[in-house]
Image: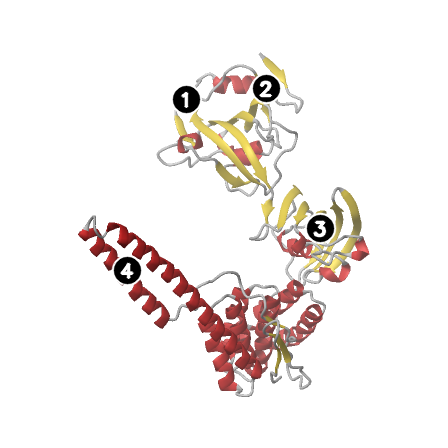
């Protein structure tokens, strides 16, 4: 018995499995061609309808169970045997063509059979020791679940492609893009317009960071849905101009109509890079002063991408290159401190110190980042190096005191931990001493080992271990650096709730 589903796919209530040698013949006679060109390359029969009408989109991460058979009934692969679902990104060429075509037609929970011609399977090469060349295959596939493509490591930007773009070119930072966007929040549309902007500077026209960053992943003509967490939307400030409150999750539908790429690094000479770097630095500083730290990071990173390799050159232009590159690294470190991205801040400080090992700002900011990571001894080393460069730096002296206090607190906690351990050993020894002399000896041995460990712990630098949460009572309020700016203000450091000092840094 066959019935036609509401989606137009042939379904059956007959018990068909890929072990049934007649399955291929049944699919051929009762299935439908789901290939775009209608060339009979993939024939589908639905065994079980899905639970909802939504289907995966291009780029979605899909999770399936499957069994693959040759037409003679011989199984060559099955995720069920491994007892683990198989996952891939749909429409990205990560699997055989039949799967990209077939799974795109499925709904969540659906089970179906696909009969695939060789050109949609393993073609003229086959698969060594499993599939002969020019073999047609039969798959039973169950679509378990799917989700959008995560464009960031933290999952803050999720993309689902409705219409695939054309070509192999993508906008870069600095490119001018023309898009149509429609933003919604809680199901209500708050923004719908055509707009042009420079990638990396979308904030200037109320385009959120997540949409701005997604531009680098889009092709011309692409239409996609972007799901943005508050960090990549309008953050805790919201956007009063668009009536968006704080910490709102947003959804944008974006169509990239056209774009004009910015020059790549290899297309510019050193003079052009330096001139453009000065402009970009000013833009980054504007974002920093406005509290738009992620946008500032984008601008300073452009400078690094252009000039880092130029430092290897030995010519008359190396000095100005090193100067502005040092500023970019220092300002990146400061932005990452504001964003509480301390590992990144340490990385940028390390790069700055490679350029100038006596950079007071780099040493101080690295010390700050390490202190906020509870790496107390490393932080203290950095602050001591600051004093070697500038003995009058009172902020560094205060930070050293903070580090010393934290180290003492850390050791005191260790002592309490070991004291409790000793008490437990003593109580246990009292219980077993009369019953078993051997057990008593072993307990005494354990006590001695713990005592030796405590002594070594106190004598050894343990401050690099994480203890509790990061210290959020230490923050940097210094301004971004500039090249040749004699009016630079002092760096204000809030060291503790009771103490506020200023750190003077030379321009």
Q: Quadrant of the N terminus?
A: top right
Q: 179 or 214: nearer the eye?
A: 214
Relative to 436, does residue 476 appear above or below in the rendering?
A: below
Relative to 210, does residue 309 appear above or below in the rendering?
A: below
Pair 3/2: label in front: 3
Residue at mark 1: 73
Residue 91: x and y, percent?
Answer: 57, 40
- Relative side of 179 to 399, left or right: right
N-terminal of the pair, mark 3 or mark 2, is: 2
Q: CA distance from mark 2 to mark 4?
A: 72 Å
Residue reaching furthest left? 437
Secondary structure under badge 2? strand
Pair 3/4: label in front: 4
In this rendering, does residue 366 appear at all? yes
Residue 365: x and y, percent?
Answer: 55, 74
Circle number at residue 11: 2
Q: CA distance from mark 3 to mark 2?
A: 43 Å
Residue at mark 3: 248
């Amino acid at each position: 018995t066959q019935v036609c589903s509401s989606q137009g796919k042939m379904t059956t209530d007959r018990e068909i499995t890929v072990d049934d040698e007649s399955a291929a013949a049944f699919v051929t006679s009762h299935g439908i061609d789901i290939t775009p060109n209608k060339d009979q390359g993939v024939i589908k029969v639905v065994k079980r309808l899905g639970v909802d009408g939504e289907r995966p989109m291009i780029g979605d991460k899909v999770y399936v169970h499957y069994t693959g058979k040759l037409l003679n009934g011989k199984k060559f692969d099955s995720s069920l045997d491994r007892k683990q679902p198989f996952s891939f990104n749909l429409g990205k060429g990560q699997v055989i063509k039949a799967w990209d075509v077939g799974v795109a037609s499925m709904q969540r929970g659906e089970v179906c059979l696909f009969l695939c011609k060789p050109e949609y399977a393993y073609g003229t090469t086959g698969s060594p020791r499993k599939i002969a060349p020019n073999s047609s295959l039969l798959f039973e596939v169950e679509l378990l679940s799917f989700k959008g493509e995560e464009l960031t490591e933290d999952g803050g930007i999720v993309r689902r492609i409705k219409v695939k773009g054309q070509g192999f070119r993508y906008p870069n930072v600095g490119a001018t893009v023309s898009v149509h966007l429609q933003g919604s929040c809680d199901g209500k549309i708050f923004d719908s317009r055509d707009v042009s902007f420079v990638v990396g500077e979308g904030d200037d026209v109320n385009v959120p960071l997540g949409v701005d960053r997604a531009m680098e992943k889009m092709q011309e003509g692409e239409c996609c849905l972007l799901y943005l967490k508050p960090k990549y939307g309008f953050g805790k400030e919201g956007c009063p101009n668009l009536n968006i409150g704080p910490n709102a999750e947003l959804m944008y539908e974006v169509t990239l109509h056209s774009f004009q790429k910015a020059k790549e690094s290899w297309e510019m000479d050193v003079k052009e890079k330096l001139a453009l770097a000065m402009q970009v630095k000013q833009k980054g500083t504007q974002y920093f002063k406005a509290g738009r730290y992620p946008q500032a990071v984008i601008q300073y990173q452009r400078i690094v991408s252009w000039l880092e390799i130029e430092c290897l050159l030995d010519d008359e232009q190396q000095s100005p290159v090193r100067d502005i590159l040092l500023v970019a690294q220092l300002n990146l470190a400061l932005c990452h401190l504001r964003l509480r991205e301390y590992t990144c801040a340490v990385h940028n400080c390390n790069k700055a110190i490679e350029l100038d090992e006596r950079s007071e700002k780099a040493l101080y900011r690295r010390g700050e980042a390490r202190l906020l990571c509870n790496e107390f001894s490393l932080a203290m080393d950095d602050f001591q190096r600051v004093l070697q460069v500038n003995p009058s730096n009172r902020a560094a002296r205060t930070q050293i005191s903070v580090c010393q206090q934290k180290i003492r607190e850390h050791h005191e906690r260790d002592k309490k931990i070991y004291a409790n351990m000793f008490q437990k050993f003593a109580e246990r020894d009292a219980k077993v001493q009369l019953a078993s002399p051997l057990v008593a000896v072993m307990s005494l041995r354990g006590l001695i080992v713990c005592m030796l460990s405590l002594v070594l712990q106190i004598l050894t630098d343990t401050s690099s271990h994480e203890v509790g949460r990061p210290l959020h009572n230490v923050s940097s309020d210094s301004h971004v650096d500039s090249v040749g700016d004699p009016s630079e203000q002092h760096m204000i450091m809030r060291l503790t709730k009771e103490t506020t000092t200023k750190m003077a840094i030379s321009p």
